[in-house]
Image (tube, helix red, strand yellow):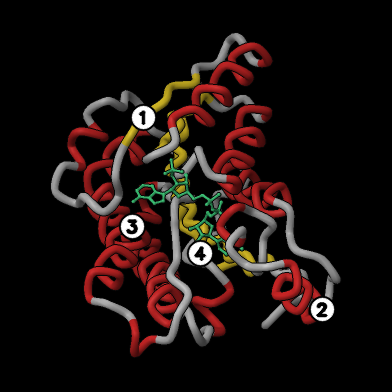
Amino acid sequence: MSFALIMGASGDIGGACAKRLAASGWSLYLHYYRHQQPVLTLAEELAKRYPKQDFLPVQYDLTDEDHSEQLTAQLFSVDAVIFAAGMTYYHLFAQTTPAELSTLMKVHLLTPMVLLTKLQSKLAASGHGRIVFIGSVYGGAGSAMEVGYSTVKGAQSAFVRAYAQEVASLNITVNVVAPGAVATKMNASFGAAALADVRATIPAGRFAQPQDISYYVAALCAPEAAYLTGQTLYVTGGWLR
Ligand SMILES: NC(=O)c1ccc[n+]([C@@H]2O[C@H](COP(=O)([O-])OP(=O)(O)OC[C@H]3O[C@@H](n4cnc5c(N)ncnc54)[C@H](OP(=O)(O)O)[C@@H]3O)[C@@H](O)[C@H]2O)c1
């Protein structure tokens, strides 16, 4: 049985990835940080629907790069890792604090990289290891008011391009799925008028649903997706690319 670790399974995109991968036969480690309940509810729902698979909650704060063993020691086999945790700050770069920059870098980049140094041997043992980061179109296009966030999202793509070359011979693929604007609670702080303004600029005429993103994550995790690696797949409804 194949096991995927979904970082940020308590979030909207991570939760959609969990549902899609469970439907494809995966057992899952479901990570949360502050919100345990969504993951407990999800694990219960998936266990009822797929009784032969395992769904195991795990907790970790990605701003803590020093105790990653506490997370990795709980995991038996790991065939795929999905990094779907994240957050942003919305203001001008000149108002950004060093603490905010540090949090952005740790959550999106540093701690995921540290975790991968610990998980690489398990992913290699799988014979079809899969790593997928949920990046952002802002990593390619950049965005005013989210300069730090755009920077770490671009760095995820740079990491994937390089790391994919190191682990291709281990049959591990490493890719980024980079959404445009997705209807999730990450955008909940924007008012209806601001959201409508963004919607008007998206050629597809709507925000993505989390399932629009999880479709590509699950596709990249399939055994047949063995020859696509080091790539950033922009899933944006035609927005900004
Ligand atoms: N929504 C969009 O428009 C959009 C567009 C492009 C890219 N993305 C990216 O998609 C990913 C998922 O976002 P989403 O829209 O699904 O947001 P979401 O529903 O707000 O979920 C955010 C997830 O990140 C976790 N998280 C936040 N801070 C953390 C920390 N310090 N340590 C560990 N986990 C932490 C949360 O855990 P808890 O809730 O348990 O604390 C939650 O699982 C992010 O990387 C985001 O940058 C989103």
Position of residue 16 measured from the top left corner of the image (x, y, whole percent)? 64, 41
Q: Amino acid at mark 3?
A: Val
Answer with mark 2 or mark 1, whichever residue precedes in sequence. Answer: 1
Q: Give the Cα distance between marks 3 and 2.
A: 31 Å
Q: Nearer the viewer, residue 66 or 87?
A: 87
Q: Contact (CB < 8 A) between labels 3 and 2?
A: no
Question: 160 or 59: which is nearer to us?
Answer: 59
Q: Residues within 10 Å of mark 3 (few under 14, many from 20)?
A: many
Q: Residues within 10 Å of mark 1 (few under 14, many from 20)?
A: many
The residue that mark 3 highlights is 107
Considering the numbered disc 2 on the image, is that residue within a helix, a strand or a loop? helix
Q: Determine the CA span between mark 2 and mark 1.
A: 39 Å
For the residues labelled 3 and 4, the Cα–Cα distance comes to 12 Å
In the image, residue 210 lies at what x, y percent?
A: 68, 50
* Proximity of marks 2 and 4: CB atoms separated by less than 8 Å: no
Residue occupying the point 62% across, 43% down: 218
- Residue occupied by mark 4: 135
